[in-house]
Image (cartoon, coloured by chain):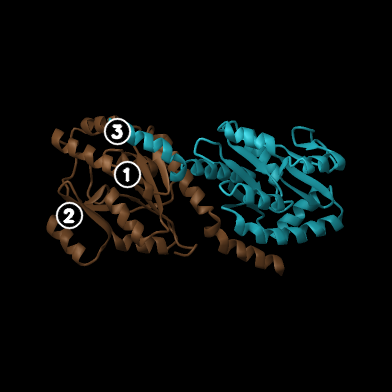
Chain colours: A cyan, B brown
Amino acid sequence: MTVDKGLLIVLSGPSGVGKGTVRKAVFDNPDTDFKYSISMTTREKREGEVDGVDYFFKSHEEFEKLIEQDKFIEYAEYVGNYYGTPVDFVRETLENGHDVFLEIEVEGAKQVRDRFPEALFIFLAPPSIAHLESRLIGRGTDSQEVINHRVQEAKRELELMNLYDYVVINDSVDEACRKIHSIVEASHLRRSRVERTLRKLLLEADN
Amino acid sequence: MTVDKGLLIVLSGPSGVGKGTVRKAVFDNPDTDFKYSISMTTREKREGEVDGVDYFFKSHEEFEKLIEQDKFIEYAEYVGNYYGTPVDFVRETLENGHDVFLEIEVEGAKQVRDRFPEALFIFLAPPSIAHLESRLIGRGTDSQEVINHRVQEAKRELELMNLYDYVVINDSVDEACRKIHSIVEASHLRRSRVERTLRKLLLEADN
């Protein structure tokens, strides 16, 4: 990835930590100028979710066909459903110099790391495990059995945070958003990214 | 440096780029909670400068005695005067968990890099060399000869930016301040810095 390409921003973290809520708040901010990569999933639409806005909702058959065609940057099966990131939108948007924001599961983030090691990996962590569990219960969409399973998964997923560049604790959605914006802004200012512009400055200085 | 210690923030860049102006604006922001390390110098006080606020002003003899006593993190002779960062304040403040902000010359930053490789190095760059020169002229404190010398120095110093973590172009003082705050905030969220807190979280989760 050269400096002129956009930055690939990956927000992940355990199930129930509030990734979706934080992502929505990030994009509600009018200063946000990165593009959201909409995930594809086979899970049931939840109340209020819109196809093509929250997710692209697909059948198992459709999803598996796209896997065969290598149309995902990452995909995972999670609690019986597929979740994936379509590759074409991401590549084209980065090539055009725009930042792309992925909000994905921890397993998927591992795959992105292998393919895009220069991406920016942000781990959204819960203030505590108890907090995570109560959030899952409050959502009211899962049975206690599913919740127990998700909490076990979350503990396992927390151990994967050492693959990330940054960790944001989600104790306040507004604060988490602000921190994500700071991380993205700082990443754009990394010397390795701006070197080309600066080299130009030096050449001009010699004229 | 362990995670509980403060972060050492080093702002540097070519002479005349506006380091002092940006530093003052950073500290005028009431949200700034890092401590400013006041430099020591043998140069003449400029109009409006206050001893113990802008610099500690010392004689050549006093400064050289402190060099002998190894009382500087870094010091440099620059256009015939010494500039240095007293070591005691920095170490104590970092140990107490506060961030310390240094605004220093490029040569000094190199010395800090050798002693504190984990510090955060921010290079303040001019929008162009022409911009830098007109700023030095506008300051009205230096002769044309000194200005020419400073511009030559600045070109040489620009080549040292590859030792820095971040580059902020000083085309607007407000924007430069905001960017510095983002860089510092992001640095506090680096996974390597917050790992200890998170490990505690994991241990609690196992109880």
Q: Which mark is residue B159?
A: 1
Disc 2 packing (10 Å; few <14; some 14–19; many ≥20): some
Q: Amino acid at mark 3?
A: Ala
**Residue placed at 20% from the left, 62% from the top?**
B67
Who is closer to the viewer here, B112 or B129? B129
Q: Quadrant of residue A203?
A: top left
- Above or below A202: residue B123: below
Nearer mark to the viewer, of 2 and 1: 1
User: Within 10 Å of the Cα at label 3, are there few (<14), some (14-19), or many (20+) other Cα atoms?
Assistant: few
Number of marks in the image?
3
Q: For mark 2, what is the residue?
A: B58
Question: Image quadrant for the C terminus of chain A?
Answer: top left
Disc 2 residue type? Lys
User: Residue B170's spot in the image, x, y percent?
Assistant: 37, 36
At label 1, counting other C-alpha atoms closer than 10 Å, the crowd grade (few under 14, some 14-19, many 20 or more) is: few
Position of the N terminus of chain A by quadrant: top right
Report helix, strand or loop for mark 3: helix
